[in-house]
Amino acid sequence: MSAKAIVNRKARHEYHIDETYEAGIALSGTEIKSIRAGKANLQDSYARIENGELVLYNMHISPYEQGNRFNHEPKRPRKLLMHKREIMRLYGQTREKGLSLIPLKVYFKNGKWAKIELALARGKKKFDKREDIAARDAKREMDRAMKDRQRQ
């Protein structure tokens, strides 16, 4: 069974990404099974450092269909696993520079370890978003023109 990565597609539209980090996630058995089935959503989720620990909020993992009364709560806070000095470095950067920790994707490493890609990101302004949309549309038009030209 190959699980696809769960991607936060809105993150790159809403934020300027400065750096990315890989962290493990502390999950229960039914959460792992739901993620393997692709039943998770990273939209509107974020990470925060509290009491020296990295915690992920608002990640929705659907309850496992074959789960029983021991099934997990869909939006519970989840602990992220990183080295202490990396967490402290992130803590300093998020406190002083106005940066946020945003999850970009959840994937499985070596087929068994659930990992999350976190981004140290700064929010985009409205005009930045419009510039990105205009650039993407211009690129799409150029690609279309090149394709039409190659056909002739």
Image (cartoon, grey):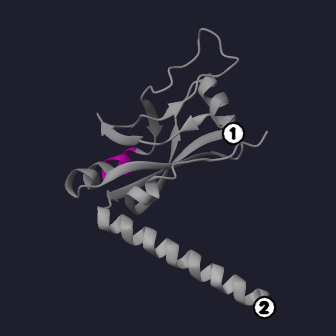
The residue sitting at 30% across, 62% down in the picture is 126
Q: Is residue 150 visible?
A: yes
The residue sitting at 47% across, 54% down in the picture is 21
| Quadrant into which the N terminus falls | top right
Residue of label 1: 112
Badge 2: residue crowd in 10 Å (few <14, some 14–19, many ≥20):
few
* Residue 118 percent across, percent down from the top left: 46, 50
Query: In the picture, residue 151 is in which quadrant?
Result: bottom right
The residue sitting at 22% across, 50% down in the picture is 95
Horizontal side, residue 34 vs residue 99: left or right? right
* Residue 120 percent across, percent down from the top left: 38, 56
Nearer mark to the viewer, of 2 and 1 = 2
> Is there CB contact under 8 Å for labels 2 and 1?
no
74 vs 95: above or below: above
Range of residues picked out in magenta: 84-89
Between 7 and 106, the residue placed more toward the observer is 7
Query: In the picture, residue 64 is in which quadrant?
Result: top right
The residue sitting at 58% across, 16% down in the picture is 71
Q: Main secondary structure of the magenta part?
A: helix
Work out whether mark 2 precedes mark 1 in sequence or the reverse, and give the earlier one.
1
Amino acid of disc 2: Gln
Most distant residue in the top direction = 69
Q: Is residue 60 magenta?
A: no
Q: Is residue 26 visible?
A: no
Residue of label 2: 152
* Residue 13 percent across, percent down from the top left: 43, 59
138 vs 105: above or below: below
| Quadrant into which the C terminus falls | bottom right
Horizontal side, residue 127 vs residue 146: left or right? left
Between 134 and 109, the residue placed more toward the observer is 134
